[in-house]
Image (cartoon, rainbow, N blue to C red):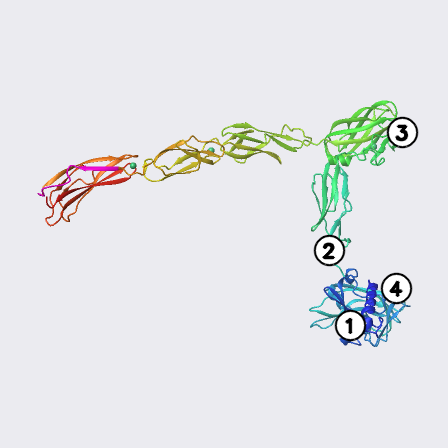
Amino acid sequence: MRSRIISLISLLLALTVGPLFAAPTYADAVVREEVQLDSWNFQFGPDSATSPNPANWISVNTPYSWYPHLTSDDPNLVLNPGFEDGTTSWAPNPTTAVLTVDSTDKHSGEASGRITGRTAIWNAPQQDVTGLLNERGQGTYNGSFWIKLASGADTATLTLAVTATGQTTKYINLAAGAAGSASFTQISGGKNVTWEGTLTKALLYVDTKALLVDFNIDDVSMIKQVESIPTSISLGQDTANLSLGETKTVTATVLNQSGEAIDGLAIAWSSADPSVAAISNTGVITGVHAGATTIQASYGNLSAAVSVTVDPNLAHNPGFENGVASWLANPTTAVLMPDTSVKHSGDASGRISGRTAIWNAPQQDITQALNASGQGTYDSSAWVQLASGSDTATLTLAIYATGQSVKYIPLASGTANSAAFTQLSGSANVTWTGTLTKALLYVDTKKLLVDFNIDDVSMIRQEPPQATILTVNPPSLSLLPGESQSVTATVYDQNNQVMSDAPVTWISDDPIIAAINNGVVTGGSYGTSVVQAIYGSLSAVVMVTVKDMIPPLTSDNAPSGWMNNDVLVTLAASDTGSGVEDTYYTINGGAWHQGTSVLIAAEGVYTLSYWSIDKAGNSEAPHTTIVKIDKTAPLLNVQLDRTSLWPPNHKMVTIHAVLNSSDAASGVASVILTSITSNEPGGGQGDIEAALGTGATSFGLRAARSGSGTGRVYTITYTITDNAGNQSTATCIVTVPHNQ
Ligand SMILES: [Ca+2]
Ligand SMILES: [Ca+2]
Ligand SMILES: [Ca+2]
Ligand SMILES: [Ca+2]
């Protein structure tokens, strides 16, 4: 990296600075870097300490992408730390001291840095690390340097002088230690580097405590400690296979972001199924029961898992694929060897030879596995081939329990021969009382003392039936209200066998819709109910739908009598159960219409029929109502027997009326004498005798008139009303002339 920078600077000097800045050579130039958001700003010029005038500097901006950021791959804040690029980035402080490159005396590489001409102990090789320290920020920094004094011995220190706005300069001792003149010594340490406000300058330098000797330094570093963050958990294995009762330890390591182990963190362990595999808080797995599960190690949000399989077979190395591991010959005077030429499966079988008694046998101690597996019924099997002859061979379990004599349980037996492997198989109850102290599994023969081979030995506990699946039949049914139907539930074990003695519990989520009693569902009101069969943690449901058998009921608000205006009939429908789907009507047996509002405007007598259908399709019988409309007024003609009274002798004269009435539709309801008036003011009083407001057809009028008038006129009015309330009037007059 450093060399790339130098190449770049050389290039820039050649291309840009050279023509403008003829005097300075690269060796004289000081390069200042300024990190900007999208570019590097290089400033070229003579030594800043001697030529602080900015006018003497040339500034060159280069795109940031020209070369990678320093900090991305170099944690060291110290540039040119081993003086391999001369004294670049370094300067003597004060400039009256002299910093040179020493290619003879060095700790590494081609050179070290040598300071001479020191006149005070603080005179030191120094580097400005302001930019990189600002960039990396506050934190713990480790410092290290190699030093060799020209003579004597003294304490040497790597010091960081930090100046921040408004603060006095703070001197942070990054590393201190004893330096000598015999050889380079490494001095290292670390300190918190903090400041308040804005960091304006950070100077790193090496000096001595007492001696004003020259000294050489090399390989100076100042590196920020990176916080170790737990990033992942490594278990070193993805799977673990265990026998029953067997224990295995899983080691969990928390790794940091660099993949390095972080010690001393407490791992939490858990088993997805502790009934299959238990886990201790130190990562020890125990095979509890045949099956598969997952063991998880976690730390905070981090976790890692191991898939664990627990073998149901109590016999280890059952097929002799791992030689005779877990097996032995009993007694040890017999010989048990793996046989790769005669075998039932895999690469080998186990062959016993040197038998001197029929009980001499290949044997395995399965105490731990049997203790873990427990008492119960075991299915067992072994394959046997004799070296010669034919004999009964038996797989036997010898059980030793406290206070009990040895119990020999034949697990499997069969007739073995020398032609081929024969399978011994059988089931046996394995029980004991007290504490099981030893269990030995072995295969022997009944009569012959021949050698024989065994392979694929297994002893597996029959699992007690375990309810695994629950089914119901039928899964759904539809009932009428009051109808009943049986439903059945069947529980199956892990081997898909029906468990006969597994009574389920039935529950209906809405007994008003569907009641369940002893496996019989009875429909109640319309609706859907979930009937559930429950057995332990298993459940299954029957969806019961109870049909709607009740049709809707519709009524009308039609008026019962004759109407003399438009009639709007509203049909109101309701339904028990599924609800009203539609209402229909017809007028006088015409076309059916859908709707609940019927407007009848024209005169006539109408038969309105209507009915509704519910959502279940039930239809009610039609209802009918009669609507009668008569908008035409009745007709009336009145004929009087006298229309003129003479002489005007003040006598009362009785007049008879003949009423001719008729009505086209609803018929005449009444004809009423509604008024008799006189055109002579005051002349009417006592001059008219009539039963007004009745259907009177005779009345009395006085034959009188005013002497100063033009003659008296009586006006008689009858009102006729039909049955729909339509009215009309008829008037006629009777006169009393002024003179004849
Ligand atoms: Ca060096
Ligand atoms: Ca085998
Ligand atoms: Ca209904
Ligand atoms: Ca009429």
Q: Residue furthest right?
A: 104
Q: Are marks 3 and 4 in contact (CB under 8 Å)?
A: no
Within-10-Å neighbours for mark 3: few <14, some 14–19, many 20+: some
Q: Name the residue under label 2.
A: 229
Q: In this view, does 536 lie to the left or right of 420?
A: left
> What label does residue 58 carry, if any?
1
* Distance between mark 1 and mark 3 Cα atoms: 99 Å
Residue type at mark 3: give it. Gly
For mark 4, give the secondary structure: loop
> What label does residue 354 carry, if any?
3
* Distance between mark 1 and mark 2 Cα atoms: 44 Å
Mark with earlier residue (1, 3): 1
Quadrant for residue 495, please give it.
Answer: top right
Of 547 and 134, nearer the camera is 547
Q: Which of marks 1 and 3 is in front?
A: 1
Q: Mark 4 points at which residue?
A: 109
Q: Do the residues labelled 1 and 2 touch (CB within 8 Å)?
A: no
For mark 2, give the secondary structure: loop
Q: Give the range drawn in magenta.
A: 635-649
Q: Tell me which image quadrant ligand 1 sits in.
A: bottom right
Residue type at mark 2: give it. Ile
